[in-house]
Amino acid sequence: MENHNKMLMLMVSTFFFCLMPTFSKQNTFTTIAPNHFMQFGDTLVSGTGRFEAGFFYFGDPQRQYFGIWYKNISPKTIVWVANRNTPVRNSTAMLKLNDQGRLVILDGSKGVIWNSNLSRIVSVKSVIVQLLDSGNLVVKDANSSQNFLWESFDYPGNTLLAGMELKSNLVTGPYRYLTSWRSSEDPADGEFSYRIDTHGFPQQVIAKGKTILYRGGSWNGYHFNGASWLRMHRVLNRSFVITDKEVIYQYETFNSSMITRFVLDPYGIPNRFIWSDQTQNWVAIASRALDQCEDYAYCSINSNCNINDFPICECLEGFMPKFQPEWESSNWSGGCLRRTKLNCHTGDGFLKYTSMKLPDTSTSWYDKSLSLKECKTLCLKNCTCTAYANSDIRDGGSGCLLWFNNIVDMRKHPDVGQDIYIRLASSELGIFRILLHLLPCQLYIYIYIYSIFLHIIKHCCKLKIEDT
């Protein structure tokens, strides 16, 4: 009987032991070699421990993603997701290097869910996977520190980190840009994108599909001219490179210990965050203030939007509403038309607007070598040119930016804007405005002649009085 009870207890213990979940050993890697793989619970850590990569899920363990996050920040802040559109479902995920040197994510049946799409086959023996301290996940030659065969920075998600490039190859493509998440717990491609529009003079835009919603503006040497930059200028070193082959935008921090990220949220709103060690929270230091003037072409064409005025839309000087009754009822969709047509042969002039967010540059022309004076002359020679400005405001200004036909999406800048010169018929400018736009020496000549003329009249009047 006693032996029977012992046997029964052994069977019960064995039964419950078999029901207990099994746990694999969790590994921490600094590199992944071809003979290694990662599963849920394993992590890949950058050299200084700032970033960490591994599998995770949001709420449903049956939808697993491989991503990168800050190792020592809680709650987990995801900055990049590999398989954002194809989560591993209902099985245990695995990440490894395949025989061609590609980084792949496999499901439980060894089906490929995602791969790094390496363009060339390499010797797998010399390849490793490493997470850099910048947050860049790379497939690289094990014998070289810089020979990257593939890198996550080339495939941005919704987050732009320091050192990451928004890069557009104008010859062969591709165009790299941020894409919002579908929701805060679904990293799949959302509706919104943050990109550099390379048509005309390159400018930063936020779009929903192909429709532009907001414009950050063109680069003026320091920043995108529609952005508020007074605070950012002190903490970030931003760069923008334009050649005939590519356009590249990136930023670095002046202080390497600063942790910052730029995120396009699921609603298409861009936000700049800095981590505060004091409060142990992310602090939003720059978020686009989406007032009405930020909506693309809110006041339609040939108009100016000023959020501090009422009404906020007004036609540019020398222009009038296309549909006056609608305009007076705050329906500005018709925009504005010129009161007087331009006439290149009788002489047009320019009216200066200061502290402006420059208009849409997608149909503009530019030359970085010209001066502002040369820019004005070039505009006057082209009867379709409607405005000009410096393309770079550093060191007193340089470069030439020309607009043609209608002026679109111009507003009064909220802090530091740029000067732009709008072309008008000479009759619209008036004698005093014409004088203001003459060269200083010409102005002095006119004043001198006018003073002589007054002196002669005064002298003649005096002689006439004496004769009487």
Image (spheres, helix red, strand yellow):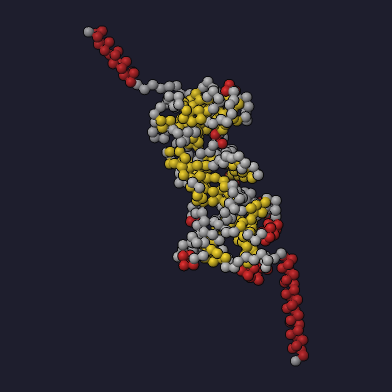
Q: Residue at x 42, y 25 (%)?
A: 108
Q: Nearer the viewer, residue 256 or 191?
A: 191
In the rendered image, the vertical position of residue 327 relative to residue 108, given as above or below: below
Where, quadrant-wise, is the N terminus in this rendering? top left
Residue 88 left/right relative to 360: left
Total tally of numbered discs in the picture? 0
In the rendered image, the vertical position of residue 21 relative to residue 319, given as above or below: above
| Residue 121 in view of the camera | yes
In the rendered image, the vertical position of residue 47 relative to residue 452, given as above or below: above
- Give the x, y percent position of residue 187: 45, 38
- Give the x, y percent position of residue 428: 61, 69
Q: Residue at x 41, y 30 (%)?
A: 89
Where, quadrant-wise, is the C terminus in this rendering? bottom right
- Give the x, y percent position of residue 433: 64, 68
Q: Residue at x 61, y 50 (%)?
A: 201
Residue 188 left/right relative to 169: left
Q: Nearer the viewer, residue 305 or 98?
A: 98
- Give the x, y percent position of residue 111: 45, 26
Q: Residue furthest left?
A: 1
Residue 331 left/right relative to 243: left
Q: Residue at x 56, y 41 (%)?
A: 175
| Residue 420 in view of the camera | no
